[in-house]
Image (cartoon, rainbow, N blue to C red):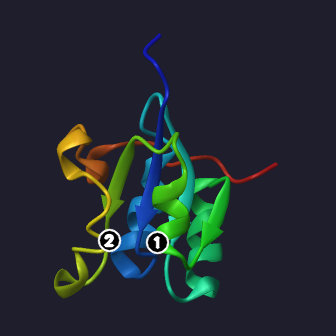
């Protein structure tokens, strides 16, 4: 078994909800955070992804040391969400076509 990757999803609008619904079917990925300035959207996507936490604070996400992957699903003009003090050079780039992951997670028991 590979090491589990803890991911954060930034953006819980239409595309973000689609990613949230598919994220839990990606092997060895656990959703640590879903972040959106509209907390009601973050909460709804958090249920889909079985996220540990939802927030409207980008800083809160990036302060958490166990986040290893960030899925940015925000409007194109807001992709640069991370404050400059966070080092992109330390990030690993991973990829998965989330639209091809099946099946979606079963509903909560």
List x then y, in percent, for residue 33. Answer: 56, 58
Compared to 83, does 20 lie above or below? above
Q: Residue at x 47, y 10 (%)?
A: 1
Residue depth check, mark 1 versus mark 2: number of the one nearer the observer: 2
> Label 1 neighbourhood size at 10 Å, few (<14), some (14-19), many (20+)?
some
Q: Residue at x 63, y 68 (%)?
A: 54
> Label 2 neighbourhood size at 10 Å, few (<14), some (14-19), many (20+)?
few
List x then y, in percent, for residue 74. Answer: 30, 78
List x then y, in percent, for residue 93. Answer: 20, 41
Q: Residue at x 61, y 84 (%)?
A: 39
Find the distance from the CA under tag 1 to the CA under tag 2.
8 Å
Does the image show residue 15? yes
Report which residue position mark 1 lands on.
58
Q: First in sequence: mark 1 or mark 2?
A: 1
Report which residue position mark 2 lands on.
83
In the displayed structure image, the side of residue 25 where residue 100 appears, left or right: left
């Amino acid at each position: 078994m590979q090491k589990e990757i803890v991911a954060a999803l930034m953006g819980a609008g239409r595309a973000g909800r689609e990613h949230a619904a598919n994220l839990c079917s990606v092997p060895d990925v656990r959703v640590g955070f879903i972040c959106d300035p509209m907390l009601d959207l973050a909460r709804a996507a958090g249920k889909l992804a079985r996220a540990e936490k939802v927030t409207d604070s980008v800083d809160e996400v990036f302060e958490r040391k166990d986040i290893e992957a960030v899925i940015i699903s925000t409007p194109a003009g807001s992709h640069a969400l991370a404050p400059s003090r966070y080092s992109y050079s330390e990030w690993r780039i991973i990829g998965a076509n989330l639209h091809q992951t099946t099946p979606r997670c079963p509903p909560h028991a």
